[in-house]
Amino acid sequence: MKRKAATFISIALITALLAGCGGAASTAPASAPAATAAEQNQEKPAEETKEQPAADAKESEEAGKSGEATETTSPAASEATEASKEATKAEDAKTPDAQAAASGEKDAAEKGLYFSKGVYVSYAKEAEDPPKTHFYIFTDNNNGHTEDASQGGIGAPFSVEQKDGEVAFRFGSAEEEPQILTVTSAENGVVTGTFKTEATTRNPELVFEPVEGADPDTFNSADATGAAEVVSYKGKDGWSVIFDPAEFEVKEEEDGTSFLFKEGTPGANLVKISFIPEKQPEEALYNLTQSWEADPTDPDAIDRIEGFFPGTSDKWGYWRSFENKKIIRSAIAGEYHDGVLLFDFAQVPGEGEGTTISDALSELINSITYENFGPQKMYEYVPGTYVLTGEIDGKAPATEYSITLNEDHTGTIRLEEESDILWGSIALLHTTPPFTSYEYTIEGDSLVLNLDGDWVTFKKK
């Protein structure tokens, strides 16, 4: 029972589609502040200062005998006094608003808060030259909202609960499940951490950097970044995307809507979004790829991968891609309202500065949202828990072998140990390195798994 297993979409993209940012990380304390001048002086060897107290006592005694009041002032003390005076003047010179802000920051620090009223720009720590367009706007220590300048300033309200090592964000409403940011460092107002999310393999460490001088009551992400004006387009089949009209021309057709990139060869760089009723995703992709000039006798001419459908974290999709010297083609299809939602990409190789066109097409699709995606009925028979019924290499395993598949395409597999997995149409994938995959099939109420070339049967509970 051999067949070619579909490749899963890259781990990085799975992570991005699941949560955009998120994942568990170990908690590390905030960096300790540098020692003060007084602390540094206390660390000096005793022999450097042991004669000074005796000299001061003798001088005081002689001054007392003469009846004169004597003030002993060293050069260092004079400098410290002058510095103190200057600091006092500087503090007095602050405006009431500045004094209040400083006091608020001090209060937040004393309470162990990582975030206080203000604006923070968030980006991946490991990214090279990050765009810095995503903002967390705190209206106080416990509430705020996000804004993404690259998506027309869209965002979501949030509330937070801050405690040592963690910040729990609830996006949308207080009834939502919290997303936990595990703090890895907090210094000079800059917070770094990772979000804990389920069924992800690698979650990037994020930086939350205060935006100096930004007023959370009046902040506008587009004004702050100089982002282009974007517009929203709503398709008749319940989906919406955001795009820059300076970059794209919209062409509405009977069988879908095309977004044509204005640079390069006219009409050649585009993404078309179509709804195809009463079809299955792989059938729709087969019909589309017949026109791709790929060698029909070469099974590897078209790359095939699977993963979470754009704009979702629990719906499944199928990818196809092909490239030659004349054209780059790719397509994504997923079951949607008893039919198929299809994204059809075309691009001329070498056109556009760097990856300008590819990035613009990807950003348009990544902005997609749905009024109501609906269930994917083609997978209704798969979810459940399956238990091994036979033997492995002629022996019954010491522990129960089982596989649990959830409706959202996450799951667990317990062989010698339990591991998290994602499941697609014909393969199970470990979500941790080395990302081992197993070919499988469902036959009635049984799951048949390929373990190193041996097909073993798991029965559904």
Image (cartoon, grey):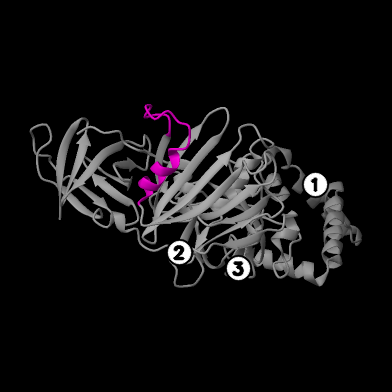
Q: Give the mark, 1 or 3, whose residue is nearer the N terminus.
A: 1
Q: Which residue is mark 1?
A: 55
Would residue 283 be counted in the magenta stretch? yes
Percent of width and height locating residue 276? 43, 55
Span shown in magenta: 280-302
Residue 407 vs residue 365, the one in the foreground: 365
Label 2, residues with CA under 10 Å away: few <14, some 14-19, many ≥20: some
Label 3, residues with CA under 10 Å away: few <14, some 14-19, many ≥20: many
For badge 1, the amino acid type reads Ala
Percent of width and height locating residue 322? 48, 34
Q: Residue furthest front?
A: 254
Residue 76 vs residue 353, the one in the foreground: 353
Residue 20 vs residue 362, the one in the foreground: 362
Q: Give the mark, 3 or 2, whose residue is nearer the N terminus.
A: 3
Residue at 28% across / 48% down in the picture? Answer: 412
Q: Which residue is mark 3?
A: 144
In the rendered structure, are the residues bearing label 3 and label 2 in contact, judged by CB atoms less than 8 Å apart?
no
